[in-house]
Image (cartoon, helix red, strand yellow):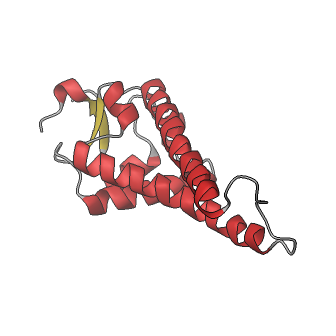
Amino acid sequence: MKIVQLYLRVLAMIIDALIWSFLFISSVLIYRILYHPIGTPWMDSDFQHFETNLYLWPLLFFLLFIIYYILLDSILGGTIGKKLLRITVVNNKFKKMSIMISLSRTLIFFVLAIFWLDFLPLLFDKTRGRCLHDILTRTYVISAAVSKF
């Protein structure tokens, strides 16, 4: 088993962030085209649409993030960014993660990333190369060349 170095994980995360940001921006543009044809204002004079959208966009962004990571990590063994860099996520038996493990891993990562706590284990044990969400969900990010599935 070869655990992947942090720089590859960060690079995969940047690639993935670009992809799901593109998905988010595309969905905003589709909304704009469908519900506000060209030439109409984005919001009513009383700001009713703007206020509704103010709450919907972060929710949509969060849902795209969660769905992207959960489905790709559990079904394909990794996101598009991970696949491009030839790395994969496995459970503690070095098999594909279930959707439930992928869900908990993604939600834990999301919460820990908000508070910048996910990389704390790396400060104390650089040889392991596992982030806190990996430790809590008993998963590993390894080179795809040594993956057993």
* Residue 116 placement (x, y as % from top left): 62, 47
* Residue 30 placement (x, y as % from top left): 56, 53
Horizontal side of 41 relative to 77 (left or right) equals right
Farthest residue to the right: give it. Answer: 45
**Considering only vertical position in the picture, is 50 above or below 125?**
below
- How many dots with numbers? 0
Horizontal side of 133 relative to 37 (left or right) equals left
Indicate the quadrant where residue 22 lies.
top right
* Nearer to us in this view, 64 or 131: 64
- Identified at 45% across, 48% down, the residue is 132
**Considering only vertical position in the picture, is 109 above or below 128?**
below
- Identified at 63% across, 53% down, the residue is 115
* Nearer to us in this view, 103 or 71: 71
**Considering only vertical position in the picture, is 52 above or below 3?**
below
* Residue 52 placement (x, y as % from top left): 70, 72
- Identified at 39% across, 28% down, the residue is 127
- Identified at 38% across, 47% down, the residue is 134
Indicate the quadrant where residue 125 lies.
top left
Is residue 54 at all visible to an observer of this figure?
yes
Q: Quadrant of the C terminus?
A: top left
* Residue 136 placement (x, y as % from top left): 38, 55
Farthest residue to the left: give it. Answer: 149
